[in-house]
């Protein structure tokens, strides 16, 4: 087992750390990506090989805590398959993610479960449908948890119509699991790409939201006064749209982003190509 820090050169190689971690690794120095490390079974030129996998993970978790300013940082543990989040297949929601994990032993358990999620029948069926190998290696990304006030998914092109002159944003209260898991009707925002003019705002009926608690996360009811209140200000909408615009230009393809606001701070949590654009 090897540990690769997200801001190291080795963490830009999808063969070593998987598509999700590699996409973030390339962006970590220039964009607000939470600090973290990747656990991989693949060997690269830069690595920290440990005879005891648990000790290696525990050491990395301790060092992450030093970077975060706390002995026991809360982390997100996300699967990062070698062929995930590429131009052809995204695997969105097919592999396990665990939020608000605390302690080295709990992190090790979550890493093991992420690796095992590549072998589920659902994941294997998706691989077969995409013509991909069924035994692709799995890496796991461990990052400081962003305790989000608002979570958003941002598309730098309209994923329904294919229009490239529009940026589409879905947003909801709390952590992003309710949003990406489809258990909430989010707010919808449409932004004109060339000048970031907000064309459309439509509040969703945000009945549920995911929050951190002592056992990880849970879904709770959104207070009635907040259910149909817009979750993003105009300033936040434009920050998200500007980030999508910038990343589309630097990456060279329309992007699908997962983002979060904790207070006024915007964080980039995932960046992948949009794989569902109509022809």
Image (cartoon, rainbow, N blue to C red):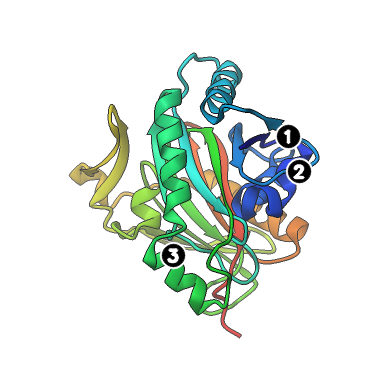
Query: Which residue is pictured at 46% across the width and 45% down the height?
Result: 233
Badge 1 local density, few (<14 within 10 Å), some, or many (20+)?
Answer: some
Query: Which residue is pictured at 28% across the width and 53% down the height?
Result: 206
The residue where tag 2 is placed is 44
- Mark 1 or mark 3, which is nearer the start of the sequence? 1
Residue 278: x and y, percent? 56, 82
The residue where tag 1 is placed is 47
Residue 29: x and y, percent? 73, 37
* Residue 111 versus residue 90 in the image, above or below: above
Badge 3 local density, few (<14 within 10 Å), some, or many (20+)?
Answer: some
Let me know if residue 160 appears in the view.
Answer: no
Residue 140: x and y, percent? 54, 44
In the rendered image, the quadrant that contains the C terminus is: bottom right
Kind of element beneath mark 1: loop
Kind of element beneath mark 3: helix
Q: Nearer the viewer, residue 43 or 197?
A: 43
In the rendered image, the quadrant that contains the N terminus is: top right
Label 2 to label 3: alpha-carbon separation? 26 Å
Q: Nearer the viewer, residue 99 or 277?
A: 99
The residue where tag 3 is placed is 123
Residue 109: x and y, percent? 40, 35
Q: Are marks 1 and 2 in contact (CB under 8 Å)?
A: yes
Q: Nearer the viewer, residue 255 or 108?
A: 108
Query: Which residue is pictured at 70% across the width and 54% down the height?
Result: 15
């Amino acid at each position: 087992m090897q540990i690769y820090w997200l801001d190291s050169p080795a963490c830009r190689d999808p063969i070593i750390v998987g598509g999700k971690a590699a996409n973030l690794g390339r962006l970590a120095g220039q964009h607000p990506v939470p600090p973290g490390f990747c656990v991989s079974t693949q060997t690269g030129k830069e690595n920290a090989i440990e005879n005891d996998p648990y000790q290696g993970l525990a050491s990395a978790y301790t060092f992450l805590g030093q970077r975060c300013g706390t002995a026991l940082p809360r982390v997100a543990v996300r699967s990062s398959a070698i062929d995930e989040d590429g131009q052809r297949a995204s695997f969105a929601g097919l592999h396990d993610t665990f939020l608000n994990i605390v302690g080295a032993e709990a992190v090790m358990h979550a890493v093991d479960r992420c690796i095992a999620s590549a072998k589920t029948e659902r994941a294997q069926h998706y691989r077969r449908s995409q013509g991909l190998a069924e035994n692709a290696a799995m890496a796991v990304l461990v990052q400081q948890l962003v305790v989000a006030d608002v979570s958003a998914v941002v598309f730098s092109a309209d994923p329904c119509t294919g229009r490239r002159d529009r940026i589409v944003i879905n947003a909801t209260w709390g952590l992003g699991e309710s949003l990406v898991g489809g258990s909430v009707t989010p707010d919808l925002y449409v932004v004109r790409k060339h000048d970031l003019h907000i064309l459309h705002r439509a509040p969703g009926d945000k009945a549920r939201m995911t929050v951190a608690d002592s056992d990880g996360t849970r879904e709770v009811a959104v207070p009635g006064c907040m259910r149909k209140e817009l979750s993003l200000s105009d300033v936040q909408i434009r920050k998200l749209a500007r980030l999508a615009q910038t990343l589309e230009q630097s990456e060279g393809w329309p992007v699908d982003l997962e983002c979060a606001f904790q207070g006024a701070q915007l964080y980039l949590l995932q960046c992948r190509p949009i794989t569902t654009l109509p022809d």
